[in-house]
Amino acid sequence: MRWLLGAQIIIMSVSIPEQLYQDHHLSLSRLPSWLERLFIALTYRAAHRILTCRAFGAFVPILSRNPLAKDKLLVVDTLPSAMPTEAFFQWATTFPAHSGKPAPVFRLIYVGRLHVEKLVEDLIQVMALLPRHTAPRFVLKLIGDGPDRHRLEAMAKDLGVQDIVEFAGYYPNERVAEELMAADCFLSPLTGTSLREAALLGVPIIVYERDWVVGLLTHGENALMVTSRDIDAMARGVMRLAEDEALRRRLSENIRTLAQQLWTFDKLNTSLAQIHDAVR
C-alpha cells in the first residue's frame, strides 16, 4: 500500500512485547508469540521511520539494538503518549511539593488497570509481608479497575490483608492527584502514565527494574528499584522508605525534578516540531 500511495509510514512502539513473553508466556495479541514477532518484524521492515522518545526510557536502547529498527529511529525528548493528561497537569499545579513527613499510617498507592499483566498481585503479597502490629501502620489503596479485580480481592482475603488493602475503583483526574498527594509511596510493578503523574507530584516511588523505566530512573536517587517479581525486596523497600525520612525527601525532590525535565508541554512542543521537520 505504501508503494501505491507514495506515503511515508511512521510507527511508534508503545510496549515491550518481550517483557510480556517472559512474564506470562503470552503475546499482546494472543496470537502465538512467534507469529506476533513475525508481524512486528514485518512492520519494522515496512516502516519508513520508527518514532520513540527519551521519556520512554528503555525503548530507545531496545530499539537501537534491533537490526530492523535501528537505522530508522527518530528519537525526540517526549511524545503525547508519554505525557500525563492536560487535565492532570492543571490539577497538579495547584498542589505543593510532596512533604515527605512521617505519619502513624504509611499510605501506599497504586494507580492503574487491574489486569494480570500489570502484576498487581505482587503488591497484595507485599502487604502480607509488612509488619502489622508496629508503627507505622501500612495501608495500600488500589485506584483503578479491571478484569482481575475479583481474583485480587480473593487473594487479599486469603492472605488476611483485606482490611489494609482498599480496592477504590476508578477516580477522575482531580481525585487521583489528591490521592497521590496524600500517599507516602507509589508502588509500580508495571505502570506508565500513573508513574509519571506520581513523579510530577514528587511522590516517592518504588518500582520494578524492568520495562521502560530501566535507564531512566536511578536507584537510590530518584526511585527505589527492585528486581522484577522480587516481592521480598519490594517489601524491604517499603519498610526502608517508611523508616528513612531523608531518603523520602531525596527521592521526592529528585523524581519531581526529572519529571519536570521530561514531561512538560514545552518539551512536547519542541519534540513535535522536530518530528514535523524530520518527516515533511
Image: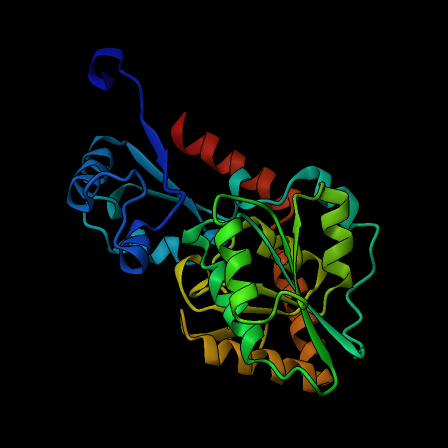
Q: Residue furthest top?
A: 4
Q: Quadrant of residue 228?
A: bottom left
Q: Quadrant of the C terminus?
A: top left
Residue 49 can be seen, yes or no:
yes
- On the rendered structure, is 148 left or right of 251? left
Residue 260 can be seen, yes or no:
no
Closer to the camera in the image, 134 or 182: 134
Is 245 located above or below residue 164 in the figure?
below
Closer to the camera in the image, 125 or 264: 125
- On the rendered structure, is 280 left or right of 175? left
Q: Position of residue 181 (x, y in %)?
A: 76, 60
Instruction: Please name the residue shown 62% across and 45% down the image.
Output: 84
Q: Position of residue 115 (x, y in %)?
A: 46, 49
Q: Position of residue 77 (x, y in %)?
A: 51, 49
Is 87 located above or below residue 245 in the figure?
above
Q: Quadrant of residue 242?
A: bottom right
Instruction: Please name the residue shown 58% across and 44% down the image.
Output: 83
Instruction: Please name the residue shown 22% across and 16% down the image.
Output: 1
Closer to the camera in the image, 234 or 62: 234
Q: Position of residue 252 (x, y in %)?
A: 69, 70
Is 61 located above or below residue 13 in the figure?
below
Q: How many marks?
A: 0
- On the rendered structure, is 105 left or right of 235? right
Coloration of the structure image: rainbow
